[in-house]
């Protein structure tokens, strides 16, 4: 059974009104949470590619990435939970796991189910909520993994969009 139904949430996946790259985040995180995400990617066997400033490198420990000098090349980790869906983790700060997804890749129930499964795996692995905010509207989540419900839930009223 699906966590969310496409017809109920499709307004939150409209790239024209929501921006094409919503802000995905796990607030109140730690270096250990970042490492748990890296470990989860390896455990699940999701295809991934780590790079710093365009140079592809082996995936390092989270502590090494998050302790890099401020002026160092920007690191990112590209993760494909399926061949058609890409999440890009940005490593901006230790206290928030942040990543982007492209709404143009997330159209329809099947792709929504992939996203919900991905958020569920991360949320369960960390025991923390995973939130999706419209692009540039951090602090206004529309959907997210709810730890107590153990599923992805609606956090905003779609009728207000």
Image: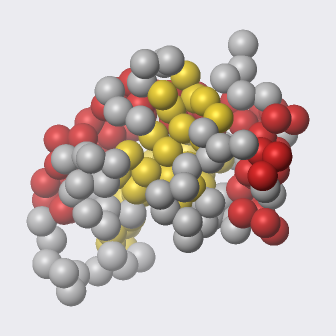
Quadrant of residue 3 within the rendered picture: top right
Name the residue: 41% across, 31% down. Answer: 123
Residue at the far top in the pictured view:
1
Residue 103 x/y as whole percent: 71, 56
**Residue 45 drawn at (x, y percent):** 44, 31
The one of 110 and 20 positioned closer to us in this rendering: 20
Q: Nearer the viewer, residue 31 or 150?
A: 150
Q: Is residue 88 visible?
A: no
Q: Where's residue 75, x and y in %?
A: 33, 69
Residue at horizontal 21 percent and vertical 57 percent from the top = 94
Please give left or right for residue 3 compared with residue 149 in the image. Answer: right
Q: Is residue 87 left or right of residue 126?
A: right
Q: Is residue 1 left or right of residue 48?
A: right
Q: Which quadrant is the C terminus positioned in? A: bottom right
Seen at 43% across and 19% down, the residue is 148
Quick check: 42 above or below 127? below
The percent position of residue 84, horizontal first and vertical second, equals 70, 46
Q: In this view of the protein, which residue sits in the foreground, 90 or 141?
A: 141
Q: Quadrant of the N terminus?
A: top right
- Viewer-side residue, 143 vs 81: 143
Residue reaching furthest to the bottom:
71
**Is residue 148 among what the camera can see?**
yes
How many marks do you count on the picture?
0
Left of 107 or right of it: where is 119?
Answer: left
Q: Tell me which corner region of the image, top left, top right, bottom left or bottom right, holds residue 57.
A: bottom left
Q: Note whether 108 is above or below 67 in the view shown.
A: above
Residue furthest to the right:
7
- Residue at 72% in and 43% down: 157
């Amino acid at each position: 059974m699906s966590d969310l139904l496409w017809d109920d949430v499709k307004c939150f996946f409209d790239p024209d009104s929501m921006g094409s790259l919503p802000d995905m985040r796990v607030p109140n995180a730690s270096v250990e949470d970042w490492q748990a995400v890296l470990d989860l990617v390896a455990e699940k066997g999701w295809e991934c590619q780590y790079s710093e400033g365009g140079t592809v490198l082996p995936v390092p420990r989270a502590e090494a990435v998050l302790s890099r000098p401020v002026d160092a090349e920007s690191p990112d980790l590209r993760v494909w939970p399926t061949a058609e869906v890409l999440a890009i983790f940005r490593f901006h700060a230790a206290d928030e796991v942040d990543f982007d997804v492209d709404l143009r890749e997330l159209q329809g129930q099947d792709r929504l189910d992939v996203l919900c499964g991905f958020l569920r795996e991360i949320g369960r692995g960390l025991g923390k909520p995973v939130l999706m905010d419209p692009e540039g509207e951090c602090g206004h989540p529309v959907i997210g993994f709810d730890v107590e419900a153990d599923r992805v839930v609606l956090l905003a009223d779609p009728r207000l969009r």
